[in-house]
Amino acid sequence: MGVVNVTPDSFSDGGRWFDTTTAVKHGLDLVAQGADLIDVGGESTRPGATRVDEAEELKRVIPVVRGLAAEGVTISVDTMRASVAEQSLAAGAALVNDVSGGLADPAMIPVVADAGAPFVVMHWRGFLEGGTIKGVYADVVTEVADELHARVAAVLEGGVAADRVIVDPGLGFSKGADHDLALLAHLDRLLALGHPVLVAASRKRFLGRVLAGPDGAPPPARERDAATAAVSALAARSGAWAVRVHEVRATADAVRVTRAITQARTAPPEPGAHGAEGAR
């Protein structure tokens, strides 16, 4: 899942794809690099970001969705507003990626249910306008799994089909680095919920903490793509349905290598394919 942020204030690439023409071109470039679908968002959800109004979000998102759909691209729309989801689906989007899991807008679940669209339900504990909130956990893996289970139940009750639901642990949302790492280490607990799992780790703060230098300073977000590819490979090996990334090529290559190694576990090497010379 390649990311196209049509915003001036994204934490990693704010403003680079704010123009519709540039955003559409970037989405097509990500597809050429190996993205299976493009996630288009018009509102930053980074900690401290203030919400844009509905009209502005629609102005940002709909032309990009329409432009990419015209090129045959599979699109998810990253929004917490039912109106934006509804108009994006009408413009050609295929699925809805809501970081609030339908909690921010009560009309979201009915819109998704009526459209029959796949719905990404992320673990969410509220808006981050004041920074990371409610990030206290006794057992982050158990609590996130339980809260996602409850949220999925509400989504199903609202009419979304079970085979249309995708779950996302919400890395970085009301979570510190240790929480994010623990969730990645135990993706099996989330897969046990019985739904595809989306992992959105790209360039996030916990990677900056892992990569911090001796002075404790994290590298800039755009210098975390190799680390993102590593997480993507591990997530793919653990059974993730998709990984959401800003820089596609490195992750696509990492996932391909992971798949090849996994396949080699069950397929014996061809006899005589490589002799001693080739092993040096």
Image (cartoon, rainbow, N blue to C red):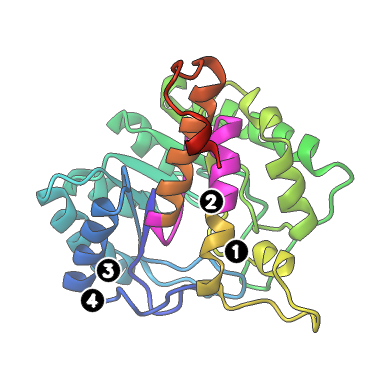
Comparing marks 2 and 4, which lies closer to the viewer? 2
Q: CB of mark 1 within 8 Å of CB of mark 2?
A: yes
Mark 1 touches mark 3? (CB < 8 Å): no
Q: Determine which quarter of the picture holds residue 115.
A: top left
Q: Name the residue rendered at 63%, 53% in the picture.
A: 171
Q: State the residue position of label 4.
A: 19
Q: Which residue is mark 2?
A: 200
**Nearest-to-viewer mark from 1 and 4:** 1
Residue 237 location (% of width, % of height): 57, 33
Which residue corresponds to the image point at 27% horizontal and 39% vertical from the top-left?
94
- The residue identified by callout 1 is 204
Q: Residue furthest left?
A: 70
Write the residue at 31% across / 45% down: 37
Magenta part of the chain:
230-249
CA distance for labels 1 and 4: 24 Å
The secondary structure type at the circle numbered 1 is loop
Residue at numbered disc 3: 60
Vertically, is 109 above or below 250? above
Judge whether residue 174 can be spotted in this image. Answer: yes
The disc, 1 or 4, on the residue closer to the chain's N-terminal end is 4
Q: Nearer the viewer, mark 3 or mark 2?
A: 2
Of pointers 4 and 3, the one earlier in the residue sequence: 4
Mark 3 and mark 2 residues within 8 Å of each other at the beta carbon = no
Identify residue type, mark 4.
Answer: Asp
Against 112, is 98 above or below?
below
